[in-house]
Amino acid sequence: MLRALPYLVVLVPALLPAQSLVAPSGAAAEQAGHTWFPGFGTPMRDAYLLDAAHLPGLSGRNLVGLDLRRDLGRAVALAGGAAQLEIHVSHAAASADAPEPAFDANHGADRTLVFRGTVQVPNSPVPGPAPDPWGSGNAVSVDFTTPFAYRGGTLCVEVVGRTVAGQVAADWPVDAAVRVAPGTTTEVGTGCGALGLVGPSAVVGESRLQPGSTALLEASGKANTPGLLFVGVQEIPGGADLSGLGMTGCRLHVAPAVTLPALYQPSVSTRMPGLATASLRLPRDPALAGASLWFQWLDLETSLPPSQWSNALGVSLTNAVRATIAAVPAAGFATVSADLGPTGLPAEGQVSSGRIPVLRLRTN
């Protein structure tokens, strides 16, 4: 009888009735958020971490597939296409409430390639009064070629997605669960660059202003010029007037605690000639909730002909931004995401605590 035990361990998951579970728990109904899935319009590498509390009843079963659904909150028809996906699953080495920016650091030693191939993204009609969220026109289904034996604990699902030429699902947002409140931002002063912009020249995304998440920052400036990003923990009241240096109308509002290099890349937007971006990982320290950081960008226009300078010195400033960090609950799920470059896979991504696509995990 003892000799039969190894065979029973293998057979028991197969003898259990097939089931599916919508994760994270509580996401059976349409969620208020949406996100972009790798390969659906944009080549991306994502890792999704889910704590065991969001996977009730799955321990001891084989995961054999996953489904995702469109964002039904967008009341328009979505044009489908195809995506090339590669999916790895493991028992995570990191907590879903403290994920690592490095993709490999989130995986456990049993990382398994469960799928590699092309999936079809359907043409999805305008949602009716009572749409079926998992109907064939609203969902994408992936059948694993290699099952994954889930033993409990935090699950890590990594998806590398690439577009398929001629079949790009350019605008197919998927339903996403969001369990965090956004931070808040306040514009301080005005920029002094001759850009002709309507609105601020520097912004900070509010959705990722939580401890442990990656804050996203953008600034407009002259294309193909270097710059600096000033990060401070306090504001210069009223701003320091730099007109005496030749920077007419420019005020420095941030007392820099950290200065980071930047580059204003040519922008495809007609609103701005150049765009500088930065990402800043916020420490996962609950004491940061309610704290503020100040950001302001400098543009070294001296790399351009003097006729293109905004002032006599050839140096301009954006407006400043005060960003106040929100509290982050222990949501038990998170996403690490990065766009794919022209070669190779990005080793690190941006952390979004308390955000994840709604996934229906299937077992046998």
Image: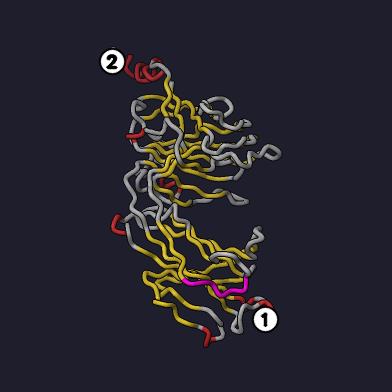
Q: What is the three-letter code of the residue carrying label 1?
A: Pro
Badge 2 local density, few (<14 within 10 Å), some, or many (20+)? few
Quadrant the N terminus occupies: top left
Image location (x, y in percent) of residue 120: 61, 31
Q: Nearer the viewer, residue 54 or 124?
A: 124
Location of residue 227 with respect to 171 vertically, above or below:
below
Image location (x, y in percent) of residue 230: 46, 71
Q: Nearer the viewer, residue 275 or 161?
A: 275
Quadrant the C terminus occupies: top left
Q: Would residue 190 be counted in the magenta stretch?
A: yes
> Quick check: 245 left or right of 213?
right
Residue pictured at 42% horizontal, 21% vertical: 19
* Residue extent of the magenta highlight: 189-195
Residue pictured at 34% horizontal, 26% vertical: 57
The residue identified by callout 1 is 306
> Quick check: 243 left or right of 291?
right
Q: Nearer the viewer, residue 65 or 76?
A: 76
Q: Label 1, label 2: how many angstroms apart (C-alpha)? A: 86 Å
Say if residue 114 shows up in the picture: yes
Q: What is the three-letter code of the residue carrying label 2?
A: Leu
Q: Nearer the viewer, residue 28 or 9?
A: 28
The residue identified by callout 2 is 2
